[in-house]
Image (cartoon, helix red, strand yellow):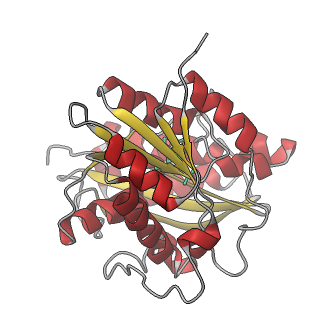
Amino acid sequence: MHTHKIATLISIDEAMKYRASLGTTKRVAFIPTMGALHQGHLSLVRRAREDNCLVIVSIFVNPTQFGPNEDFSKYPRTLERDVSLLYQENIEALFLPNTANMYPPNYSTYISPQSMAAELCGKTRPQHFQGVLTIVLKLFNIIRPQVAYFGKKDYQQLFLIKKMALDLNLDIDIVGVETSRDHDGLALSSRNQYLTKEERVIAPQIYAALKKAKEQAQRETKYRDPDQILKVFLKSLEPYPELKLEYVEIRRQEDLTQIHEAFLEPAVILTAVRLGSTRLIDNIEVGPYEA
Ligand code: AMP
């Protein structure tokens, strides 16, 4: 049994005082989330634990990262369950800010990424990454962690957060953690709860198609041509017309710019797919391969 008590922090003032009260002997790790926690979130928490840090998690469904016709109001909110999961992980503190405190009336300052924010997911979610970076920087300023953990599942988000840390000279290590998947390969996501039983059966085909594209690239040199790789991906999705492709692209891991030749540099295949009313994203790292 866990007798350990989690500090539950609601106000920003309280969170800042709590942070100041932590000693300097251990590093403070921070994991921002929107709740509806699953094993993916918990893998970040465990990673922080393993790295011997004091662990602070936040749960905040951030309105500024949702578009006007997106799922902000129906986003799953399962606070009681989330808290009990976090108890089992022995975290130090849980920060549960509210919207009125984070964005008081006349709130007016936003972080807007200049590169890569309008591409990939940014094409259909134009304000999304501005909302993400703004809330992440605000949370960083309140919690002042030495290290923060983010999932590779949100690959473009991880990239833009690392870029913000670099560009704005944040003294915070940004650590990317591998994607946690269900037994059938589907990337864990709070949004998987939206899927119907029938959709849930089809959803793993997204990762299956990514894996197939990667396996082709490993096996046959001619399939290392980015266009050929994308064809393998698209062909794998063909039998599933329910999966409506938003984008699939091969980019450099380094800076997410487009890659035109064979994978001499580490690359990543990124995709977003609609399934019914749910938007799913996933990715797979590929290469580098010998010429
Ligand atoms: P969210 O609650 O969706 O905003 O996610 C909070 C953090 O958990 C982000 O850093 C995500 O990238 C990460 N995350 C979400 N799903 C997964 C997953 N399946 N595997 C690893 N990390 C994840």
Between residues 201 and 99, which one lies in front from this camera angle? 99
Q: With 21 as the anchor, is 241 left or right in this view? A: right
Q: Residue 185 at x, y = what percent?
A: 58, 34
Residue at 68% x, 45% y: name it: 36
Q: Residue at x 18, y 53 (%)?
A: 265
Picture coordinates of residue 41, whole percent (x, y): 53, 39
Residue at the far left: name it: 291
Along the line of sight, which residue is nearer the eye, 208 or 290? 208
Determine if residue 250 is in view.
no
Quadrant in the picture for the N terminus: top right
**Do we see residue 258 in this rendering?**
yes
Q: In the displayed image of the protein, which residue is found farthest to the top?
A: 1
Whole-percent x and y of residue 48? 36, 33
Q: Nearer the viewer, residue 269 or 186?
A: 186
Q: Quadrant of residue 46?
A: top left
Image position of 287 with respect to 91: above or below: below
- Name the residue rendered at 29%, 45% in the picture: 147
Residue 141, position as x, y percentages in the image: 35, 62
